[in-house]
Amino acid sequence: MAEGLTGNLAQMPIGDMVRMLTAAGQNGRLDLADRGDRGAIYLREGAIVHATHGPASGELALRHLMTWTSGAFRFEAQAATPEATIHRPANELLAEIAAMAAERDAIRRAIPSPEAVLRLRGAELAGPVTLQPLDWQVVVRLGEATTASELVASLGRDEFTVLRALKGLVTAGLVEVEAEARPNTRPVATAAFFATLRQAAAAALGPFAAVIVEEEVAAMGATLEAFPKDQVSALVERISGEIEDDARRVQFQQKMIQVIRQAAA
């Protein structure tokens, strides 16, 4: 049934696709790609037995891949599984991942932006609030106003765990989220930099270079007008990943390294 299945995640959500493959008892590999990012999910008789994404594998990789909402996919039927790193039933895994996705949506409703300013509420609470150990750590660090992203960095915990704790404190009325984020005071890349970047990318990628540049900037959560200067190296690296020709990729990288060094001088 799934032989040669290809398409785009914008048209067929990854959750629906994986459920379809598991229900049909499929064997094979589901390859995923999104702007240079790659991953794969392996199935054996409808069971999810392995997943890879960068250096990660197993359930960690699977959870990340199941959050993708864009990119291309292809199912290679009967592709061999290199190893088995996932052992739980597929329906249990997918239900858990769906529950996490629903909780992420609830977190986004409570904390719309990682750069929104958080502070402890001064008003009296309507009732008692029970705090877990992580909640106490969050409250201590909110003695002064801070952002969600700053809080995650200071606690050294994974983002989902911290934001889930924050959402609970916001819901309980202990923490409030300011409507406006702090203004971005980080130095931004110049228009001259982006003019050179587009020119170098066009030489390596052709007429679609400008679109690729804009997509990569958006994927990094920024805009051309306010792109952080300290992120230009990461942007260049992402665009390099789109250049398939080795010689053109090297030429592009050398050109942009020279530009970045001049800007830093």
Image: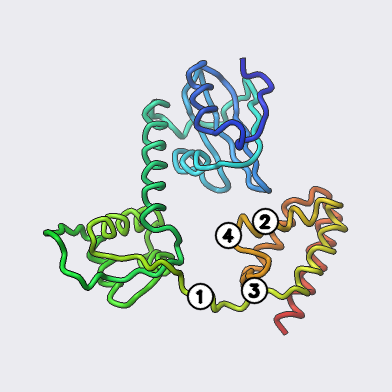
* Separation (CA) of disc 3 from disc 4: 14 Å
Q: Nearer the viewer, mark 2 or mark 1?
A: 1
Q: Kindly identify the amino acid type of the residue bearing the numbered disc 2.
A: Glu
Q: Please tell me which of labels 2 and 1 falls first in the chain.
A: 1
Tell me if label 2 and label 4 are in contact, CB under 8 Å: no
Asked if residue 249 lies left or right of residue 147, the reply is right
Residue found at the far left of this picture: 128
Q: Which residue is mark 2?
A: 216
Label 2 residue SS: helix
Mark nearer the viewer, 4 or 1: 1
Q: Name the amino acid, label 3.
A: Lys
Give how far across and how far down residue 8 sits, in percent: 65, 34
Earlier residue among tags 3 and 1: 1
Q: Nearer the viewer, mark 3 or mark 1?
A: 1
- In the rendering, which numbered label is found on residue 229? 3
Q: Is residue 227 above or below residue 71?
A: below
Calculate the distance from the C-alpha at mark 2 to the C-alpha at mark 1: 23 Å
Mark 2 and mark 4: span between their CA atoms?
9 Å
Q: Which residue is mark 1?
A: 183
Q: Position of residue 68 (x, y in %)?
A: 55, 42
Tell me if label 2 and label 3 are in contact, CB under 8 Å. Answer: no
Residue in the image at 42% along x and 42% along y: 101
Q: Measure the alpha-carbon separation of dots 4 and 1.
A: 15 Å
Disc 4 secondary structure class:
loop
Question: Of label 2 and label 4, which has the lower sequence position?
Answer: 2
SS at badge 1: loop
Q: Which residue is mark 4?
A: 221
Is 155 placed above or below 47 here? Answer: below
Query: Which of pointers 2 and 3 lies earlier in the amino acid sequence?
Result: 2
Q: Camera-side residue: 160 or 182? A: 182
